[in-house]
Image (cartoon, grey):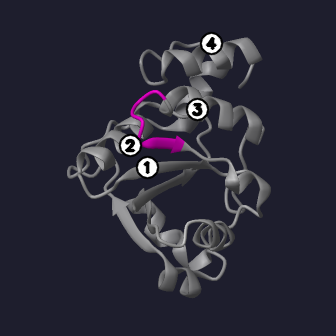
Amino acid sequence: MRVALLGGSFDPPHRAHVQVIEHLLQSGRFDEVWVFPSPQNPLKPASVPFEDRLAMCRLAFEGLDPRVRVKEDEGALSGYTIDLIRHLKQHYPKAEFTFVGGSDLKDELPRWKEIEALKKILHFEFLPRPPDPASPFDAISATEVREKIKKGLPVGDQVPKSVLAYIKNRGLY
């Protein structure tokens, strides 16, 4: 089984995240896409609790395709990718995992815990992000979405309707 792993803060999940998942599925290179909201990114703190981001990911992604799974394994772990991958390799020894991230993430890899060990047990794929002309994805920033919500400005279709309803119900951001 070939699995694309999409990790992130998802604070909140938005249309560009949906586009990435659809792109990965349509590529035919992966049997499934597993989404892992980070409980606490050691390099970037989230503004809302893990439980809320997990719930928003389920609302945004689980109905897209039966091959998409929102996983909470990482919630019980340290937040470091190496710990997650070791956990996954134990539980899914026959799976082939590819970590998918934006091209900007490549520059952060040297700061990751045990990155050399991680490179030996995991494939990486970096997708071009806007404003790169090679990027097929919309230029949406979770930071900008949060700021618009804080200011009471409309976010249009940048955030799935179910996620926006959740945000409003919970008074997030």
Q: Secondary structure under badge 2? A: helix
Q: Is residue 126 visible?
A: yes
What separation in Å lies between label 2 and label 4 (alpha carbons)? 28 Å
**Is the C-beta separation of discs 3 and 4 under 8 Å?**
no
Q: Main secondary structure of the magenta part?
A: loop
Q: Secondary structure under badge 3? A: helix
Image quadrant occupied by the N terminus: bottom left
Q: Secondary structure under badge 1? A: strand
Say which quarter of the image contains residue 76. bottom right
Sequence-wise, the earlier of marks 1 and 2 is 2
Q: Given the image, on which type of amino acid does mark 1 rest? A: Val
Other residues around mark 3 within 10 Å, as few (<14) / some (14–19) / many (≥20): many
Residue 148: image location, x then y, percent? 57, 22
Sequence-wise, the earlier of marks 3 and 4 is 3
User: Which of pointers 1 and 2 indicates the residue nearer the eye?
Assistant: 1
Other residues around mark 4 within 10 Å, as few (<14) / some (14–19) / many (≥20): few
Residue 57: image location, x then y, percent? 58, 35
- Residue 152: assigned label: 4
Q: Secondary structure under badge 4? A: loop
Rendered residue at 61%/13% (across/down): 165
Of 146 and 36, which appears nearest the observer? 36
Rendered residue at 57%/22% (across/down): 163
Q: Which residues are magenta?
A: 63-69
Q: Which residue is mark 3?
A: 58
124 sits left or right of 91 in the view: left
Other residues around mark 2 within 10 Å, as few (<14) / some (14–19) / many (≥20): many
Q: Which residue is mark 1?
A: 33
User: Which of pointers 4 and 1 indicates the residue nearer the eye?
Assistant: 1
Q: Is residue 127 above or below residue 144?
A: below
User: Which of pointers 3 and 4 indicates the residue nearer the eye?
Assistant: 3
Q: Which residue is mark 2?
A: 21
What separation in Å lies between label 1 and label 3 (alpha carbons)? 13 Å
